[in-house]
Amino acid sequence: MKKQPTIKSLLAKATRLFNTYIRERDKDNPCISCGKYHELQAGHYYSAGKYSCLRFNEDNVHGQCKSCNYFKSGDLLNYRMNLIERIGKEKVEKLDLIASQAKRQTWKWNRFHLEEIISKYK
C-alpha cells in the first residue's frame, strides 16, 4: 500500500506549482513594485506566512523582482499602488477585507484543499 504524502509535502508541491504559474502569467510584465524588467519571483502582497489563507490567491501574488521581494520586504507601498493599477481598487479592497478577517482566524491546510490546488496548477 502506497503511503500518502504529508500535508507539508503537499503544501510544498502546491506552492511550487502556484509560484511557477504566477511567474509564467506575469513573465511579460515588469516587477509589480519597482516597474523594472527582471527575472521575477512570486511576490505576495499579504505575506504567505502571516496570511496563509491568501497564499494561493492570484490577486494577492504577482511577479516581483528578488530585490523588491526579499531586500525591500516587498516594497509594499509601490506594490499597492501598482496592484490597484493592475487589478483595480475593488479587488485590492477585497484582499484587505480578507486579510483583516484572517487576523482573527487560524488557517489550517487540509489534504483535499491542497490536492485541489495542485490539480488546478499542474
Image: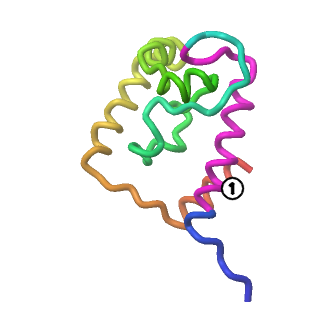
Few, some or many C-alpha atoms within 10 Å of disc 1 (few <14, some 14-19, many ≥20)? few
Q: How many marks?
A: 1
Q: How is colour applied across the structure in the image?
A: rainbow
Image point (35%, 38%), residue name: 98
Instruction: Give above or below for 39 relative to 12.
Output: above
Instruction: Judge by depth and name the residue closer to the eye, 82 or 47.
Output: 47
Q: Amino acid at mark 1?
A: Ser
Which SS class for mark 1?
helix
Residue 61 left/right relative to 102: right
Instruction: Write down the residue under mark 1.
Output: 119
Q: Position of residue 122 (x, y in %)?
A: 74, 50
Residue 99 left/right relative to 22: left
| Quadrant of res 24 | top right
Q: Position of residue 110 (x, y in %)?
A: 49, 65
Instruction: Give above or below for 21 relative to 38.
Output: below
The extreme left residue here reads: 104
The extreme bottom residue here reads: 1
Instruction: Give above or below for 119 relative to 96.
Output: below
Magenta-drawn stretch contains 64: no
Main SS category, magenta section: helix
Instruction: Judge by depth and name the residue closer to the eye, 97 or 18.
Output: 18
Q: Position of residue 71 (x, y in %)?
A: 53, 25
Image point (60%, 22%), residue name: 67
Quadrant the N terminus occupies: bottom right
The extreme front residue here reads: 71
Image point (69%, 55%), residue name: 119
Image point (59%, 71%), residue name: 6
Magenta-drawn stretch contains 25: yes
Please state the extent of the stretch shown in magenta in the rendering: 10-33
